Image (spheres, rainbow, N blue to C red):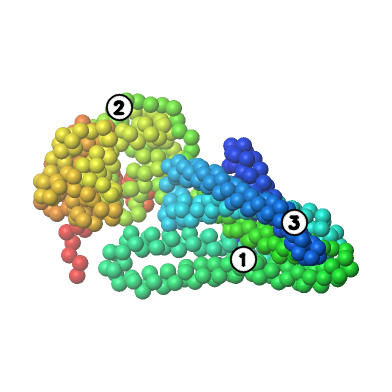
């Protein structure tokens, strides 16, 4: 994978700092505290130099020390360091709160954004990468806001203060000390330029690695069943090596900052010691002044190195911010309509529907059909014929390329998505249960349902009998992966959830595929009662389950090639007949 530089470092940082707009007052207070704390730290060597001079003068006066002055100076030193520590504590406390508020805001925006994104986004992006943006990338931003900003401000103030204090001691020695700055700046620029692309690659590869791990952990049973451990480890190693390659380079260049700046600072330090010694011998400087200046020289490299380190951190932060803001700028679902209704009659009309997941790959072509209220419509066809796609379009998980879908004579685009979907109930082949009690999972269909409503829904779905066999009955906790109950039991619970929702229109996509034959018969009876008076769309591969459908739509390559009742279609001897008879053919 080629390593790219951050697309827009300046733009990413400007967007990030725009979040601090509401915190201007707090930032101003923090800046004042940081300046005051740093100023006290900067003054300390100069005051200590004054104490040294007093001691030297005492020796020169044959031991006649001015102890009052020395004690007063030491008390001032104690006060400076005490206030420096206290102010740093207050500043750190304030910045921690500020960074957490910004982090909270970012995570909230990402969470809300997820629910506004179209299904196609999640078809093209791994869940692990999305999770990495919420966790790793936001954490990187949080750490920078918490410590990076204040460290950059304090280092800048410290550099300025040290220069001012050095000038008050000796302008000539200050000139020598400043001569190393251009060299330090050049080195910092080279390091920042080299490290930027690696930090971006590190964040991207971390997202891919998390995506792979999330997929493997959630599907570990399938991986083990097909002996896919080696392939999984191989894929993990590939992502891990890319992350290692980008990570060690990013951290290597970042780690070079302190040693290089320190080496350059030491060169200046040696020159200052030599020249300062000459000035002391000539009487142009006091011993205390030399001591203070040497301390400033030693301190000078530290904030410069910190600034270089912060610059490297900002490269990583910019890469993380780009990923977060790119996610927040992803194209959202089209605007909702405004129509609302308390209930649907259930008349559904497809008019010349055309759709493709990709612009150049059409899946549904000129699909036209009318479903009357209360009808049970079965959709059959070979795999890839477009059966499930029709349901996705009906729920507005995707929007049409052309044509219209009408519910009760109103284009579904004119309804709000929330209102449209609130009148649909879905039971899919792939079940979804969350970590919680059985009752809570069923109640997800209608959150205000009572315990009695939940029990009645479970009885209608033929789930009550096996729920009672668990030690905690309806209070039994389903674990995070929902693997402490069988696949058939999970399907029954999702059916109970749909029954509880009491929708106007039902969508059943192979709803009985994971249950045994006896349970399938029981569920079919419950479904017949549930579907009475409701418009129902049933997608089925086992054609024996849809014999009683009012109309069967036979799809082939995105078109309806046949429609009618089970008996009518068998009598025609066409595509449906071949599909039906293929279930009983013996493959030799």
- Kindly report the distance in space between the C-alpha atoms of the residues bearing marks 3 and 1: 49 Å
Report crowding for label 3: few under 14, some 14 to 19, many 20 or more residues within 10 A (C-alpha). few
| Residue ID at (22%, 49%) | 477
| Residue ID at (82%, 70%) | 277
| Horizontal and vertical percent position of residue 422 | 33, 34
Residue nearer the viewer, 402 or 430 = 430
| Horizontal and vertical percent position of residue 171 | 85, 59
SS state under label 3: loop
Identify the mark nearer the N-term, 3 or 2.
3
Mark count: 3
| Residue ID at (19%, 48%) | 476
SS state under label 2: loop
Asked if residue 304 is positioned above or below residue 441 in the image, the reply reads below
SS state under label 1: helix
| Horizontal and vertical percent position of residue 220 | 31, 64
- What residue is shown with label 2? 343
| Horizontal and vertical percent position of residue 576 | 24, 50
Residue 369, visible in the rendered structure: yes
The answer to which image quadrant residue 223 occupies is bottom left
Depth check, mark 3 against mark 2: the one in front is 3
Q: Quadrant of the C terminus?
A: bottom left
- What residue is shown with label 1? 254
- What residue is shown with label 3? 66
Identify the mark nearer the N-term, 2 or 1.
1
Asked if residue 221 is positioned above or below residue 573 in the image, the reply reads below
């Amino acid at each position: 994978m080629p390593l790219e530089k951050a697309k827009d470092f300046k733009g990413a940082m400007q967007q990030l700092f725009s979040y601090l707009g509401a915190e201007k007052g707090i930032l101003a207070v923090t800046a004042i505290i940081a300046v005051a704390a740093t100023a006290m730290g900067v003054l300390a060597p100069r005051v200590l130099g004054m104490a040294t001079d007093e001691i030297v003068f005492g020796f020169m006066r044959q031991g006649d020390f001015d102890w009052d002055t020395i004690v007063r100076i030491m008390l001032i030193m104690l006060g400076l360091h005490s206030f420096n520590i206290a102010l740093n504590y207050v500043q750190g406390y304030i910045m921690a709160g500020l960074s957490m508020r910004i982090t909270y805001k970012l995570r909230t925006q990402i969470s809300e954004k997820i629910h506004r994104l179209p299904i196609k986004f999640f078809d093209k992006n791994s869940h692990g990468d999305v999770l990495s943006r919420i966790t790793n990338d936001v954490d990187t931003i949080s750490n920078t806001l918490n410590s990076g900003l204040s460290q950059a401000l304090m280092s800048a103030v410290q550099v300025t203060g040290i220069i001012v204090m050095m000038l008050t001691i000796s302008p000539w020695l200050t000139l020598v000390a400043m001569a190393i700055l251009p060299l330090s700046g050049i080195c910092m620029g080279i390091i920042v330029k080299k490290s930027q692309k690696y930090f971006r690659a590190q964040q991207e590869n971390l997202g891919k690695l998390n995506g792979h791990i999330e997929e493997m952990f959630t599907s570990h049973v399938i991986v083990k069943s097909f002996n896919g451990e080696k392939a999984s480890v191989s894929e993990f190693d590939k992502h891990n090596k890319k992350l290692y390659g980008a990570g060690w380079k990013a951290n290597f260049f970042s780690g070079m900052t302190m040693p290089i700046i320190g080496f350059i600072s030491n060169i200046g330090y040696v020159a200052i010691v030599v020249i300062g010694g000459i000035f002391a011998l000539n009487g142009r400087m006091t011993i205390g002044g030399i001591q203070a200046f040497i301390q400033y020289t030693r301190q000078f490299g530290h904030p410069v190195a910190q600034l270089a380190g912060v610059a490297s951190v900002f490269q990583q932060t910019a890469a993380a911010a780009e990923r977060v803001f790119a996610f927040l700028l992803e194209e959202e679902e089209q605007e909702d309509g405004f129509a609302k209704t308390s209930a649907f009659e259930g008349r559904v009309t497809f008019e010349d529907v055309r759709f493709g997941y990709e612009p150049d790959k059409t899946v549904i072509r000129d699909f036209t059909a009318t479903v009357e209220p209360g009808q049970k419509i079965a959709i059959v066809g070979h795999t890839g014929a477009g059966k499930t796609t029709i349901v996705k379009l009906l729920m507005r998980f995707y929007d049409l390329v052309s044509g219209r879908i009408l519910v009760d004579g109103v284009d579904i685009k004119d309804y709000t998505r929330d209102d449209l979907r609130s009148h649909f109930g879905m039971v899919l082949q792939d079940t979804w249960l969350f970590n919680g009690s059985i009752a809570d999972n069923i109640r997800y269909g209608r959150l205000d349902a009572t315990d009695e409503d939940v029990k009645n829904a479970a009885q209608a779905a033929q789930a009550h009998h096996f729920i009672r066999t668990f030690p905690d009955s309806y209070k039994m906790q389903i674990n995070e992966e929902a693997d402490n109950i069988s696949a058939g039991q999970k399907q029954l619970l999702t059916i109970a959830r749909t029954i509880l929702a009491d929708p106007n229109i039902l969508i059943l996509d192979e709803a009985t595929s994971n249950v045994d034959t006896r349970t399938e018969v029981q569920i079919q009876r419950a479904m017949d009662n549930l579907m009475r008076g409701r418009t129902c769309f049933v997608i089925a591969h086992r054609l024996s389950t849809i014999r009683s459908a009012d109309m069967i739509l036979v799809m082939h390559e995105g078109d309806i090639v046949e429609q009618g009742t089970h008996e009518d279609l068998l009598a025609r001897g066409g595509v449906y007949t071949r599909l039906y008879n293929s279930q009983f053919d013996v493959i030799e």
